[in-house]
Amino acid sequence: MKEHNRSIEKYFSSIGENASEIGRSKADIKKDFLHKLFYHLGRVPALTTDNDLYTALALTVRDRALRQFVRSTEQFAEKDARGVAYFSAEFLPGPHLGNNLLNLEIMEETRQALAELDLDLDHILEQEVEPGLGNGGLGRLASCYMNSMATLGIPAIGYGIRYEFGIFKQEIREGWQSEATDKWLHYGNPWEVMRPEISYEVKFGGRTEAGTSKEGKYFVEWHPESVIKGTAYDTPILGYQSNGIIMRLWKAEAVESFDFSIYNMGDYYRAVEKKLRSENITKVLYPNDENLSGKELRLKQQYFFVSCSLQDMIHLHLLQGRRLNEFHEKFSVQLNDTHPSIAVAELMRLLLDEHDMEWDDAWHITSHTFAYTNHTLLPEALEKWSISLLGRILPRHLELIYEINSRFLEELREKGLNGEQIARMSLIDDHGEQAVRMAHLATVGSYKVNGVSALHSRLLKTQVLNDFAKLWPEKFTNVTNGVAHRRFLALSNPRLASLITEKIGDQWLTDLTSFRELEKYAGDPAFQQQWRKVKLENKKELCKLLAERAGVEVDPAMLFDVQVKRIHEYKRQHLKVLHIIDLYLRIKDGKGEDIAASAFIFAGKAAPGYFMAKLIIRLITAVADLINNDEEVNRKLKVVFLPNFNVKQAQRVYPAADLSEQISMAGKEASGTGNMKFALNGALTIGTLDGANVEIMEEVGEENFFLFGQTTEEVQETKRKGYRPYEFYEENSNIRRVLDFLVSGALGEGDPELFRPLFNNLVQQDQYQLLKDFRSYCEKKEEVFKLWANESEWDRRSILNVARMGKFSSDRSIRDYCENIWNVEPVRLRD
Ligand SMILES: *Cc1c(COP(=O)(O)O)cnc(C)c1O
């Protein structure tokens, strides 16, 4: 076909069709579905399985998603628009099918098309195994941002790793967490398109050699020990009503030609073994919170995906006839935490060694390309790679990091900083085994650095990266996290979504701030009653899941008091457990009249190597066993641990919650996004002034938020003064009674030693100051119980919470990134 004809519109008009016509009718969907089922999958009707039905429907929808993507990409290219590459080692997209139906606005047509074939859409939706390519909040954030970038028309691509095994599947065995591999690809993955022709070579190990060219130019050659190929797998991610962008994930494979010498020796099997070893790189996602330093494979994963992605971007850039020295004018690369921060050294290497650029030019481009999002202040989670490991795996990068560092430190000396400051800021940590501080590399190599909530960004500037913020104040900014409200409300809570739409119209789908209009109905008894009914229906549905997965029968009339998130000591699930034990003991004493009938629901995974977190799960299941089986108590209290928390379950839990527990020690939770999802679905929050809780409370009003506990400053003051948790144990009889109960033998298999490590930790260190905040928490819970007794007041506050959630859409976060960091404009697409 002639060049001028190569546009999707022209192709379609040549066959008398309109490129934007997407086949949305019931008849179109039905026909395409049957075609996929019989002729794509080659199924005989009598042998069709549920998975076939799901796959056929997914393929039907994928056609439409890819069509959106092709059209969007064509128009982005036409406009020569500046774009964003979102680098993230984790994505947690959740099930695609329902979300895509929603974004394409073909949910009802599809439901009817299937009904006419005697098929049930909900049953088919249930079949999808979600891609668990992330640990929790950070990966989920990346996926929320993909949806918002697509919705807003941002030319964007998400780059990551196609792990063959995602986050482990959690099972509960005899009360303990046990881990099983997540075989999410077992039945195939209809959403992705493999791109065998989009592949890049990535080098590892070996040595470098410096030389001078004939023209007198200094150069370095890297002679790697091994080379691995990365192949792209693309998944379309849709925005609402509009665009499609792609998430490009890399899979590692052997390079065909690399070990030719082995072939020649006739050692075919050794070559095959080598291939298998290469593929290891993208085999498995590492669960976080574990001590990852020293994990060679983890470093290889990070470098592997970053190198493929940057090579791909350079390739695309040059393909469009642009010059490499305008790379940073065409792209902004967002580093989602330090996991991809080796990109700073890799882009330098590509520009210097592969594209013959001079240092100053290469550094200018690099340091104007990257922007870095910090996600944690926990010292143990700040990434470091030992010099010995980095030098062995990436010898050239270590040289480049040294060079970046020496130039940076020279700059500091010229500015008159003292030796102590310089040592603190160095990219190299000299304490103990020498290591590269990845957060420093990311900060030095980026033009912007942001935290993920107002509080977190402030702490980043005044504490963790204080020296850097003083040096480059304009580099630091905040973007408060947000959530994809289309997935976490429109899709997962259809009852509430339609109630709201009936009242205020549906513009909230693209503008969550329009929820403000709900405020005026907050006190309306008829609306409150409808509101309450929706919540009750959602709770009934969750009850089915709890019965099925946890074997616990819960009365939907109870107060659903929910804490779902990764299990970590700083998140203080055990604070909630201590309170439950306190309630239990009160009821046993016959003093429980004021306690609201409550179902305490927990879910979340613990990192497999994190003993305390696993013990907390064991504690929850032990308390659940005790309480649920005690006739004196179980009409008043129920405790449930729902296994294997993931996006699919999250979508069923948030809509059914009455109370959201956001009780981390202040200063530890960077933002949290679960807090937003709960409030968006009408839960009231009991929480500390941590992360985005601060901003949520600002928005919904203090009077509509159950605030307790110390502030960050008070926490730090407590620590500075020398915190002695033992004093609380001695002086507060409630605390003593609850803690003694842990080691009384009443829990677990009657072994008083089972929870001794928790007891000891709380009494001796209690680094997250549970005991200090315990009284304040219990008092707030009394208020919760009191308010629960006043239905209409509870509902009023619940409505106000939802009405004031406008700020927490990820659409707002993405607009903030565009304005404050990326300098990227949305492209308004033609229909
Ligand atoms: C939102 C979400 C999280 C993050 O929860 P936090 O309460 O912010 O820690 C983790 N996992 C899943 C599956 C989520 O949907």
Image (tube, rainbow, N blue to C red):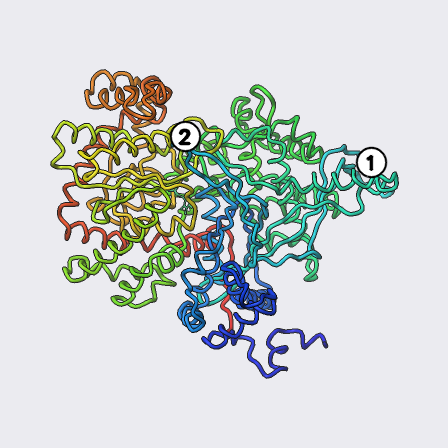
Q: Residue furthest front?
A: 46
Mark 1 / mark 2, whichever is N-terminal: 1
- Say which element carries label 2: helix
Compared to 744, does 609 lie above or below?
Answer: below
Q: Position of residue 329 (x, y in %)?
A: 60, 55
Q: CA distance from mark 1 to mark 2?
A: 53 Å
Instruction: Indicate left or right for 213 with 69 as reference.
Output: right
Q: Quadrant of residue 220?
A: top right
- Residue on which the image places disc 2: 613
Q: Which mark is residue 751?
A: none
For ligand 1, tell me if the residue under mark 1 lies within 8 Å.
Answer: no
Query: Within the displayed image, which quadrant is ligand 1 positioned in?
Result: top left
Q: Position of residue 101 (x, y in %)?
A: 45, 64
Q: Residue 815, image x and y in percent?
A: 44, 56
Amino acid beneath label 2: Ala
Tag 1 secondary structure: strand
Decide if residue 825 is in sight here.
no
Image height check: is 808 above or below 220? below
In the image, residue 347 sits, relative to residue 770, either above or below, namely below
Position of the N terminus, as image quadrant, is: bottom right
* 141 with respect to 209 (left or right): left
Q: Amino acid at mark 1?
A: Gly
Q: Taking the image as drawn, is residue 9 in sight? A: yes
Camera-side residue of 315 and 40: 40
Of the numbered discs in the image, which one, if any, rests on residue 211? 1
Residue shown at 27%/63% (left/top)? 499
